[in-house]
């Protein structure tokens, strides 16, 4: 059988997009996506759909949508330099083999990527015992695959952090990612807005001008809370420790230990390679699990993206991070891969590999091409 010609494949992709996607969707950068209106098919030159309305992490976004079979076609087709594509707000692809988190335009806009769910109606868990469970029962060790995918996820996170480290510097990028992590799923976008509104340099400056005798963590938290007061924050349904107020206080404590009084808004001297990261990141309001999340989602991606740490240094730290605890959506997978009594997600790196495996294969009903479905 001949492969589908690219034009026909893209037309099929565009037709599917046009019917509207109703399942919960997740962008390659991890944010939730909802399609409100897929847009008007444009035809001719320029983006495939015009005037779409989508919701990204709770924010309504309007603009154009471009579709490709593979993510790298954006550059190959020269769209990154074409002003006609400057209003694209979403890049929809069938495959993203390079694992990019965003597509860039020459205007320096970062366009989120959606990998179209490949199998309509795909369900997880599958209605059969999946090959990974059978292989695990026969003694196959999933660790090498999970480690490899985990490392890929670190590089994806670093790629996402790179535009920020380049434009604002490694210190601010680290601060912004720490705030996003502390915001948690409920307030990630709001805390990202907070970091944009109150950059690290302004935060440190504000704390430096606090009344004499004000404890540094308190001054930082007060500055953060002052700006956050104008943001829409979600409070309902959160544990007290995860409430925005407590998380902002925790952010004040963490920033105070990472950037003590008179520190420059640069990469902190405290966070050097070889140091016990989780211990350094633990602070009042930040337990071990959240400290691991800060290392996974902020410190190591920013360190790698900015060159503050070399790749071997970042990878070595990544591999030794403990697991913050298995996420609910991975429980089934944990049972299947742990058939021999092993703990498949024993460390943060393998857990991150599990998340990527779940997103790229399990949730797409792709057992047939999954790296854990074979014998080796
Ligand atoms: S996609 Fe792979 S890991 Fe996921 S259920 Fe199927 S065989 Fe298991």
Image: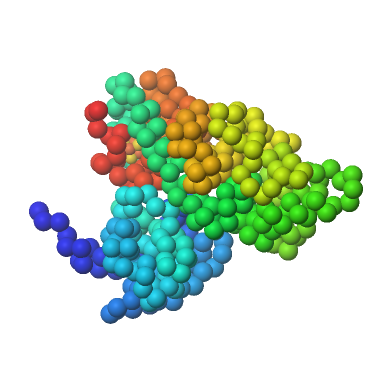
Q: Decide if residue 250 is in sight here.
A: no
Q: Is residue 335 above or below residue 84?
A: above
Nearest the eye: 54 or 107: 107
Identity of the residue drawn at 55% across and 32% down: 273
Q: Residue furthest right?
A: 212
Q: Position of residue 186 (x, y in %)?
A: 61, 52
Residue 7 location in percent, x, y?
A: 21, 67
Q: Position of residue 24 (x, y in %)?
A: 45, 55
Q: Is residue 182 left or right of residue 89?
A: right
Looking at the image, residue 11 sits to the left or right of residue 38; the answer is left
| Residue drawn at x 41%, y 37% as measured from the top left | 151
Q: Nearer the viewer, residue 263 or 317?
A: 263
Residue at image point 44% right, 76% down: 51
Left or right of 55, for residue 122: left
Instruction: Looking at the picture, tell me which residue is in the foreground, 208 or 332.
Output: 208
- Looking at the picture, does residue 33 appear above or below residue 351? below
Q: Residue 35's quadrant in the figure?
A: bottom left
Residue 111 visible in this rendered orientation of the protein: yes
């Amino acid at each position: 059988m001949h492969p589908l010609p690219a034009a026909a494949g893209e037309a099929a992709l565009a037709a599917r997009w046009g019917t509207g996607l109703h399942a919960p969707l997740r962008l390659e950068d991890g944010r939730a996506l909802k399609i409100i209106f897929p847009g008007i098919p444009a035809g001719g030159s320029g983006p495939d759909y015009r005037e779409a309305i989508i919701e990204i992490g709770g924010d309504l976004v309007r603009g154009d949508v471009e579709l490709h079979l593979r993510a790298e076609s954006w550059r190959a087709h020269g769209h990154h330099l074409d002003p006609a594509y400057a209003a694209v707000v979403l890049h929809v692809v069938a495959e993203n083999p390079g694992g990019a988190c965003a597509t860039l335009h020459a205007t320096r806009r970062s366009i989120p990527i959606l990998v179209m769910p490949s199998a309509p109606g795909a369900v997880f868990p599958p209605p059969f015992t999946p090959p990974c469970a059978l292989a695990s029962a026969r003694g196959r060790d999933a660790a090498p695959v999970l480690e490899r995918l985990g490392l890929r996820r670190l590089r994806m996170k670093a790629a996402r952090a790179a535009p920020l480290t380049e434009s604002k510097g490694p210190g601010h990028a680290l601060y912004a990612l720490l705030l996003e992590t502390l915001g948690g799923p409920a307030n990630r976008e709001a805390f990202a807005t907070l970091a944009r509104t109150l950059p690290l340099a302004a935060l440190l400056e504000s704390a430096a001008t606090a009344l004499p005798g004000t404890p540094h963590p308190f001054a930082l938290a007060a500055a953060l809370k002052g700006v956050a007061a104008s943001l829409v924050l979600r409070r309902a349904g959160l544990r007290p420790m995860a409430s925005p107020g407590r998380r902002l206080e925790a952010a004040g404590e963490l920033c105070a230990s990472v950037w003590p009084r008179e520190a420059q808004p640069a990469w902190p001297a405290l966070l050097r390679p070889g140091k016990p990261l989780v211990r350094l990141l633990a602070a009042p309001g930040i337990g071990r699990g959240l400290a691991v999340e800060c290392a996974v989602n902020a410190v190591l991606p920013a360190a790698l993206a900015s060159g503050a740490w070399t790749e071997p240094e970042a990878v070595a730290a990544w591999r030794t991070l403990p697991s913050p605890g298995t996420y609910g959506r991975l429980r089934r997978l944990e049972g299947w891969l742990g058939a021999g009594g092993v703990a498949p997600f024993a460390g943060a790196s393998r857990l991150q590999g599990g998340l990527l495996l779940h997103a790229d294969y399990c949730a797409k009903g792709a057992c047939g091409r999954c790296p854990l479905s074979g014998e080796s």
